[in-house]
Amino acid sequence: MATTEEGKTVFDVEAANVLSKELRDVFASGKTRSYEWRISQLKSIVKMCDEHEEDIADALRQDLSKPQLESIVYELTMVKNSCTLAIKELKHWMMPEKAKTSLTTFPSSAEIMSEPLGAVLIISAWNYPFLLSMDPLVAAIAAGNAMVLKPSELAPASSSLLAKLLPKYLDCCSIKVVEGAVSETCALLEQKWDKIFYTGNGRVGRIVMAAAAKYLTPVVLELGGKSPVVVDSDIDIQVATRRIIVGKWGCNNGQACISPDYIITTKDCAEKLVDSLKKELEAFYGKNPLESKDLSRIVNSDHYARLTNLLDEDKVSGKIVYGGERNEANLRIAPTILLGVPQNSLIMKEEIFGPLLPILTVSKIEDSFDIINSGTKPLAAYLFTNNKKLKQQFLMSVSAGGVVINDTALHLTVHSLPFGGVGESGMGSYHGKFSFDAFTHKKAVVYRSFVGDASVRYPPYTRGKLRLMRALITGNVWTILRALLGWS
Amino acid sequence: MEGLEGTLAELRDTFKSGRTRSVAWRKSQLRGMIEFVQENEERIFQALDQDVGKHPVEAYRDEVGVVAKSAKLSLSCVEKWMAPRKGDLPLVFFPASAQVMPEPFGVVLIMGSWNFPISLTLDPLIAAISAGNAVVLKPSELSPTCSSFLAENIPKYLDPKSIKVIEGGIDVCEQLLQQKWDKIFFTGSQRVGRIVMTAAAQHLTPVTLELGGKSPAIMDSSSNPTNMKVIAKRIVGAKWGSCSGQACIAIDYLLVEERFASDLIDLLAKTIKQFYGENPRESKSYCKIVNKNNFKRLLDLLKDPLVEASVAYGGSVDEEKMYIEPTILLNPPLDSQIMTEEIFGPLLPIITLDDIYESIDFISSRPKPLAIYAFTRDEKFKKQILSRTSSGSVTFNDTLLQFLCDSLPFGGVGQSGFGRYHGKYSFDTFSHEKAILQRGFFPELEPRYPPWNSFKLHFIKLAYAFNYIGLILLLLGLKK
């Protein structure tokens, strides 16, 4: 560990090396593998959430001005739910799974045993700084690993709260927190880990995967993309609008990986949709949304500048049909709707990750699929429709991490669904048992005895053995019998 | 480079057209694969003999048979595997449905290996096809006869618009790795595995890396003399009986207690003679070393004087025939190359221990191998091996079989790789599992929407906790 001029310790490559070795040693001791250890850690997390609900909501308010309800529901309750599920199912998840064996390997029995990967690195994000640190942590714990968590420095209050609370509630020898920014993250990435779980953007995702490649470390990358919403005609437009709003601005003011990024609808529906959005936005956030306590602010001035740039681009600035108000001092941008932005504008090229909602129009709703497929695969895709055929077409032709029909964002609360991306939106998945699996190695185990040793396996090889080998490989009892009797 | 980009563009268009997604297409390709290996069996045997000196029995067992079996299984199961799976949904979402729908990644790259040049290219190809992808297959240039055989004949049996074979060496591989793929499946060495993953990282391409490592065999004292004969056969079969030790799951080295070492060596020597005769150089059942580079690499392992001195059996070579005699070494130095690198050849170091239980620390202090083989009937020892070591797989009292079990995932962990295939795992490896949640417009839950207040907070908290009674009480005004 190096020391700065002020006498502060700096977390450098050497420190990261020591840390990773410590975690490896703890893991090798077997401590994290026991059912009891895992359950105790999970129960402590629930306790921590309950006892520090206010502190956590407070940190989130400091970092993002996150509304109380969002903090409690999307961050705390989701984490507690993950723990509760893991506590309930862990015995079952940890049990080896029997595997069928065929005549080819008779007599034998086989099973698949779940074992932890070892010492893992979790790199979290700033938008859901508590959830996206704790949920992967719960996963790694349930699977029996030792771990280090690197919370995002862009949510400093949450980061330091985690650094303070985790050692108090959890086994600090097996679960470490390292705070810091780029250099600390790089120091960690130079080490050998048994798995790296990263939540963030594609640019850093590439850096993480390239670093992992040096040690052949498997990775889960939870990234993002432009999650489209296709809105068909002939639907309950008020319900659709409300669900879009709550998935967009109701999720950290659009700063969420699965936020609806843009809408595509037909020219005929566009006006009605815009009117409905305006009406519901006002009902939800009042006439002065910059003052609303139910909206998160923009996380920092860099992102504020990025978003205002998107709005101020020439091609786009005249397309605002609602909102557009801003307050730089408070880092606030009002819910903003744009209609008819060109596809080659910045706002349509990058992931928005903010409270701006462009609406594109097409002549036929089916044309929306080509627009979506011309971009990279998003983390989520949404469709509002009552048309079964359109729905089928959408499911077959639009590839995304997850798809929701007639709602937004909810799929991430369903534990039986894997949550993860595809293509640019990431690789790997978690939630529910997928979380346990993400941090587990499934080891194949075969049990054999010495009874039944077929000489056909061994040299010297003959054409006769070939015949029998052929039969054995198929595993079909009649073929084997015939070969044994010399009939094939 | 232009040719390659054009090929890729064609495959992308083909995939986009939806051609590879239908059940009919997938089944037709799988049938084509079965026909391919069945109609060309003799020619495949000849190509394998040419490249690695494989006998038809080995060629069938490890290559042709594997491919035929895999294609038949996929053919019979593909429709079932393609079907969306229902997911459980809590009551609070009612009415809604949750499903996981497998979909192909798109255009995928499969890089095969030279030691099983047919099965390690075609088995992943079967996987990619059954999952509905378009494919570029890059066979290894170190098995040139098989590579050109595949390049010439695959287009005759499989859809040339969707499945391309590209031959070539390192420069072609480099060019391929610069492109954007939707998945890369690589079988080969750790060194090249790193190169593949680094290249994949540039495009965020998911990879499966089937690598190798030093797969140990452990033998304890709990077996009687009859079983010992069988054990010896299985060890010899797993070392020299599969491409002369040039296999990712071959036994790399053996751990045994000091007091059994010399008897074991005698028994192994006897078994080797039984299998390969007095002069294995003349045996048609014994594979050759694939090329001069690997031949030299293996000889270099023996150059270290301390290693040379530890040769207890064998050791003779014939460079012209690319032949290295089945060789056993007793306790070469642990820091020698032969004990730190994957051997991938017909040299078997035997390391002796005072107590066989020491084998657990020995193995777990080294990189995780692809396979561990343990000959023991001691149940406590088995449990320790399973819980205190990590490897792609563990097989008790036999060798290599895990490769033939379709219900078992075949793949590594740590340095031996990640990802897996065989059976349904093959289909899954080339599929993206898309989560789908479907709802109707009715009913609407008002508390979902802002402006927030404490009632709504309470409601959502209870809903998320699936506390239905609490919800009812709240709605009835009976819960504070």
Image (tube, coloured by chain):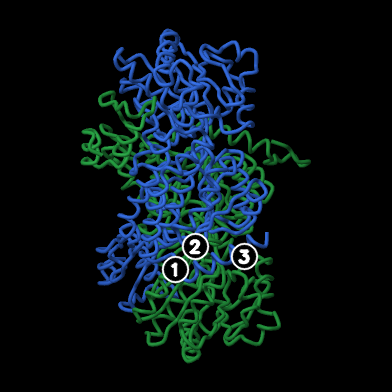
Q: Nearer the viewer, residue A402 or A415?
A: A402
Residue A339 appears in view: yes
Q: Which mark is residue B19?
A: 1
Residue beneath disc 3: B6
Residue A145 appears anywhere in the view:
no
Q: Residues within 10 Å of mark 3 (few under 14, many from 20)?
A: few
Specify the amino acid type for callout 1.
Answer: Arg
Subunit bearing disc 3:
B
Residue at horizontal 31 percent and vertical 67 percent from the top? B97
Tell me the quadrant of the picture where the C terminus of chain A can be found.
top left
Instruction: For marks 1 and 3, give the CA distance.
Output: 18 Å
Describe the element under mark 2 as helix, strand or loop.
loop
Q: Earlier in the sequence, mark 1 or mark 3?
A: 3
Look at chain B in the picture and name its colour.
Answer: blue
Tag shown at residue B162:
2
Left/right placement of residue B20 relative to residue B308 reads left
Q: Nearer the viewer, residue A201 or B127?
A: B127
Contact? badges 1 and 3 (CB < 8 Å): no
Marks 2 and 3 sit apart, C-alpha to C-alpha, by 13 Å
Q: Amino acid at mark 2?
A: Ser
Kindly indicate the quadrant of the structure image that contains residue A306: bottom right
The chain letter corresponding to green is A
Residue B47 image offset from top left, x and y in percent: 50, 41
